[in-house]
Amino acid sequence: MRCKRRLRIGVTLFAGPLLLMAGCKTSADAAAAATQMATTAKSLCDYYTALKTILDNTDQLYLLNAQLYAKPYPAENRRQVKDTEAELEKRAELASDFSTLSAEFGKLTGSTAPADVATSASKLEGEVDTLASIKASSVEQAALKTAFQLLTTAIKEHKEREAAKAMDDATRGLSDLFAKETDVWNSTEVVYSSIGSTLAGNLVDGNATDNSALLKVALDPFGLSPVTASADLNAQLAPLAKQQIATKKADMDSAYEKATDAMTKSLQEMSQRIHTVAEDKPMAYRSAPLSVSTVEAWASQIMSTGSTTSATPASKPAK
Amino acid sequence: MANALTDVQNTFLSLDNQYNMLRAACKTDQDRANLAAKYTDAQKNYQTTLNKTLEDDDVQVAALSKALKAANSVVDQATKEMGDMSKVLDGITTAIDLGSKLIACA
C-alpha cells in the first residue's frame, strides 16, 4: 500500500467544496482546512501502513521461532495474523481514498457534480463494509458508512450544505473509528516488541550474536574497529547486549505510543476544524496539527528501515 | 476491551517468554508435545481476541478477566519455582481455558 501523495493538488481542489461549505468570505479558512485535512488523512494512511509492516515483521519472527526453537506456528494461526494484516491494508486504503475524495471534491463548482466524485464517495461506503472483521468498532463503522451514504446522495443531488455536513460527519467518523480500535493496534505493537526482544535475548543466550558491536563506543573515537568477538568475550558482553535489547524495546514501545497519541490528537483536531468551517465560523489555524509530524517521522522510520524506533521529529508551528 | 485483551495477550507473551526454559525442563516427548499444544492454543486465543468485542464493564467478562489475571500470576510463580513441570502445565491450561471462556463472551 503506497499512500497517495496528492497534497499539492488537494490544496487547490479541495478548497472548492469547503468554499461551498463556508462561503467566499472565509475562503482563506477553507483553503487552510483543506491543507490540514489532506495532510492528516495521508498521515493516517502512513500510520496504518507502518502497523502493517509491524505485523508482517511479527509473522517473520514467528517463523524464525518455529525454525530455531520449535515454537509452533500452525497454518491456522498464521492465517489469523495475515487476516489482521489485511484489515490494516483496508484501513490504509480507506484513509488514502478519503484523501483522494477530498481532492476530487474540489471539482464541485456551481451546479456541476462530476460523476467520479459521487463514485469515490460510494467506493468509500463500500470500503467501510469490508472493515467488519474488527468487531470492536462495529458502531463506529456503521456511523462512517452512514456519513459516506449521505455524502454520495448530497453530491448527486447538488446539495452543498448537506455535503458539507456529511463531510464533517465522515471526518468525525474516521476519528472515532481510530479511537475505538486503538486497543487492538496497541496490542499488535506490544506483541511485536515482546516477541522480538525475547527472540533476540534467546539468540544472545545461544551465542548466536556478535556482541563486539558494543565495543564501538570505545573504539570508534580512535578510528579502530572491533574484531569478531571470541566466545569468552561474547559471554562477557552478553549482559550488556541484553540490557541493550531491553532499552531498545522500551524505545520502540515509547515511539509507538507517542505516534498513536499524536495520530489521535491530529484526527480530533482535524474533526474540530472541519466542523468549524462547515458551521460557517472563522477557523484561525493555518497549518496542520503539530502532532502530525510525530506520526510521519515514526511511520517513515518503520517503512524505510523496518525498525520501530523513531527519531524525534522537527516541530512545526501550530498556527 | 483493553483489560480482557491485555490479559489474554499476557498469557501468550508469558508463555512465549518462558518457552525455551520450560521446554528444556520437559522430561518426555509427551511433555514437550503438551507444551507445544499450549503455545498453539495461547497464540490462537490471542489472535482471536483481537477480532472480538469484549466489554470490560460486562460482569462476566470482568470476572473472567480477573480470574485470568490470577491464573497468569500462578503460571509466573510456578515457572519461577520450576519444581513440578505438571503444575506449570496445569497452570497454563487453566489460563488458556479462561481465555477461551472470555472469547466465548463476545
Image (cartoon, coloured by chain):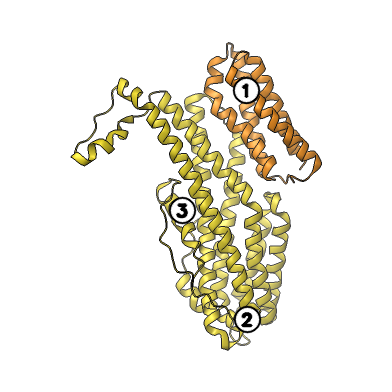
Judge whether A259 appears above or below B2 on screen: below
Q: Which residue is mark 3?
A: A298
Chain B drawn colour: orange
The amino acid sitting under disc 2 is: Lys
Discs 1 and 3 lie in a common subunit: no
Q: Which residue is mark 2?
A: A281
The mark tally for this picture is 3
Chain A drawn colour: yellow
Q: Is residue A33 left or right of residue A138?
A: left
Q: Which residue is mark 1?
A: B77
Judge whether A203 appears above or below A35 on screen: above
The amino acid sitting under disc 1 is: Gln
**Label 2, residues with CA under 10 Å away: few <14, some 14-19, many ≥20:** few
Residue A84 in the image: x percent, y percent?
60, 46
Which residue is rendered at x = 50% and y = 69% of the image? A288
Discs 2 and 1 lie in a common subunit: no
Residue A307 in the image: x percent, y percent?
43, 45
